[in-house]
Amino acid sequence: MGITDPPSPNTTLYVWRRLKAKEQYNKSYVVQLFDTFQVRQQEQNELGRFHTIRHNLKAEPLLSHLVISHGLVSEQYRHFSAKDGSTRIRVGNRAYNVSDFCTQHMGLSWDETKVILKETYSLQRRQLVQQQQARQEQQAVNSIVFVSNRSAHRWRGVSPIEASIRLLRHLQHKEQIGEVLMSLNELERYRSPEPKDNTILAAHREFSAVASAKQITKAREIAAQLTLTMNDLVASKNEAKQYVDFSDKNTGKKLFRDDGEKIVMYHRQADINHTAVALTLAAEKFGVVKIIGTKEFKQQVLDVAVNKDLAIVFADKKMEAEFIRRKQALRLPPNTELANALCANKEKAQKESRQRVGDGQQPFCIKEERRKAVKMVSK
């Protein structure tokens, strides 16, 4: 056998280049396959998503959107539900689903249609959530739920039922010796110190004075309504169901119950006296609470918490922010008389200004009337 001659350098370079080209081709082919797979996957996901939209989107939000964006006259179209529950929009003798209505009847591209369908479906879902929340609020039982799981008062070897009764007696004792926070007699501690020197208030302080005066007026109105005290409550145990009923001793009417983890009001129509004693008990027991119920009940809770200056924290951030804002607004400006004069003069000026405009005369300048109020007080 003869010995094979070694390949020439040119042959080796040629083979290497072929192998390199084949490797690059294989890589690009794999990348192409992967890209194609991703595109098809996105198309499948998009088809699935828009299948859901086509099936669930109602005609009203879509037509309302097209009225604004494309000048559609919605009164010319009727819509109904198909057998599968999806919406059909009738145009003459034809009935389109929501996407075909946009592409075939309106002549929109699929890219335009996708954007419109997404926007209107998102709007429909938000409205549905709001409606559900409104229904839940209407059906909700007014209650104060304890967020903290540790009571501020702990009695060893005492059941939750007995602890609630002891807490009521504790509050009744504090009320008898004058320690329970009252409404108006504690407003003095909100007063800013009176300036010793003559002071000219800036414009923003005048507005602050008006707001504070209104808050104080509201506090006085609420204080006049709060006639029920902790000593008017009678607690009765329900051993079988493990809760405590709290009743008004003057009427025998059950007001609320303490389940241990929440206080549940017995009457759907919120009563500020019932709310006040229940919230006082909740504040003393746990401090951090979540309020469930009607808007009227939540508003009463805020009114009571501000008016009685309860040591309480609301789990809802918006409610807690409003509580803090209203407490700060109760801080009186340096001159209460000025605030009252500003309020009275501003209302008078607005009323007379409307009368002047009706008579064809020049309206009052509110700022000028405010300056008159300041001058009047200074005299």
Image (cartoon, rainbow, N blue to C red):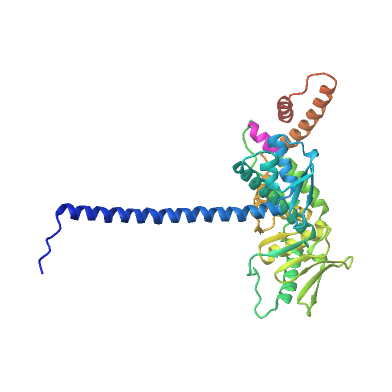
Name the residue located 27 percent from the left edge and 56 percent from the top edge.
Answer: 19
The overriding secondary structure of the stretch rendered in magenta is helix
Q: Of residues 355 and 268, which is closer to you in this image? A: 268
Q: Of residues 131 and 64, which is closer to you in this image? A: 64
Q: Of residues 79 and 263, which is closer to you in this image? A: 79
Q: Give the position of the N terminus as an image quadrant.
A: bottom left
Please indicate, yes or no, whether residue 81 appears anywhere in the rendered image: yes
Q: Residue furthest front?
A: 1
Q: Of residues 327 and 9, which is closer to you in this image? A: 9
Residue 204 colored in magenta in the image: yes
Name the residue located 63 percent from the left edge and 52 percent from the top edge.
Answer: 50
Q: Give the position of the C terminus as an image quadrant.
A: top right
Q: Whole-percent x and y of residue 113?
A: 64, 43
When the figure is inspected, residue 27 is found, relative to residue 232, above or below; the finding is above
Q: Residue furthest left?
A: 2
| Residue 18 figure quarter | bottom left
